[in-house]
Amino acid sequence: MTGKAPLIDPLEHLLGYQLRRASLATLSALSEAYEALDLRLTDAIVLRFVGANPGCNQGEISKALGVRRTNMVPVVSGLVERALVARAAADGRTHALTLTQAGAALHAQIDELAHANEERFFGGFDEETRKVLLRALDTIRARAES
Amino acid sequence: MTGKAPLIDPLEHLLGYQLRRASLATLSALSEAYEALDLRLTDAIVLRFVGANPGCNQGEISKALGVRRTNMVPVVSGLVERALVARAAADGRTHALTLTQAGAALHAQIDELAHANEERFFGGFDEETRKVLLRALDTIRARAES
DNA sequence: TATTGTTATACTCTATAACTATA
DNA sequence: TATAGTTATAGAGTATAACAATA
């Protein structure tokens, strides 16, 4: 090594790593934006799911997100404690989750920040690029099951 | 909620989340493949960096990867203990890192697995799609600095 | 018997502060 | 004084096992 020269990046040509780097870039920026609302990424995602599926239970959210239901417990509990999500007894086991008024208000702010983040990172892409990108990402995800 | 119907996914239209899901799909598959070599993703990346930059030190790798140098310590130490990477005193502070013979042999296997993974997830994409994808990912990463 | 929510726990990743030694 | 490597530690995120209450 010459000492001062930057290292050769052996991952440059690997699409998988480029994907990861781009993903981390957008997510860490979004995560920072959510800090202003005192929310982590997972909190925001759960609020979105409850907003889109009023009356759902936390097991359904866990399944949809592909996370263990044990790890959903502190997330939902935290949102309920902050009065952003309300639990109503559905049957003896499950609670129907809905957004409180405060939760709905925060949901609107989350939506704004998320769209601003999308615009920052994906704005200005022409329609063809967007289409290719979305289709490629969908193909990649589909191939994970094969 | 109807109870049996799957939840509406409110993240479907957000490119940031699609990016994350695609990224996780490719990385977890690669991570599983590396298990056969008893390597984690980070181990494989470091071996690649040392292979591409013989004589580099671990601080340079940390900087290139954007991780803290404190978190590089157990990774490099582990590779040295397994005799995959060799340290040679460069000056009193830094060690020049190189692949051992075993490390080089493992590097070849890493390369095979990584290329198989690339083929699985990105194979069959036509040249135009690859180009659009790579350019979009690069643009996204560049926008993180603005 | 299977499902939902829960507790306790552990392992990995990542982050900060502080120390040693060398430049 | 700045840099390289290290140690200890703390916080997330994610994993398993076991339990209570209910279907």
Image (tube, coloured by chain):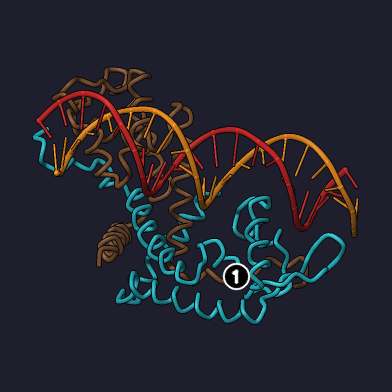
Chain colours: A brown, B cyan, C orange, D red
Eyeballing the image, is B142 above or below B135? above
Q: Nearer the viewer, residue A84 or A59?
A: A59
For the image, the number of numbered tags is: 1
Looking at the image, residue B67 sits to the left or right of residue C10; the answer is right
Looking at the image, residue A54 sits to the left or right of residue A141; the answer is left
Looking at the image, residue B86 sits to the left or right of residue B129; the answer is right
Looking at the image, residue B140 sits to the left or right of residue B76; the answer is left
Could you say which quadrant of the image residue B26 lies in? bottom left
Q: Amino acid at mark 1?
A: Leu
Could you say which quadrant of the image residue B22 lies in? bottom left
Q: Secondary structure at mark 1?
A: helix
Could you say which quadrant of the image residue B107 lies in? bottom right
Eyeballing the image, is B37 above or below C20? below
Q: Nearer the viewer, residue A138 or A114?
A: A138
Q: Position of residue A67 (x, y in %)?
A: 32, 44
Residue at horizontal 50 percent and vertical 62 percent from the top: B41
Q: Nearer the viewer, residue A109 or B143?
A: A109
Residue at horizontal 44 percent and vertical 63 percent from the top: B31
Eyeballing the image, is C5 above or below D18? above
Q: Which residue is mark 1?
A: B47
Location of the N terminus of chain B by quadrant is top left
Residue at horizontal 45 percent and vertical 58 percent from the top: A20
Q: Position of residue B91 (x, y in %)?
A: 86, 65
Eyeballing the image, is A84 above or below A68? above
Residue at horizontal 21 percent and vertical 38 percent from the top: A60
The residue carrying pointer 1 sits among few (fewer than 14), some (14 to 19) or many (20 or more) residues within 10 Å by Cα, namely: many
Q: Chain of mark 1?
A: B
Q: Position of residue A22 (x, y in %)?
A: 45, 55
Q: Position of residue B78 (x, y in %)?
A: 64, 62
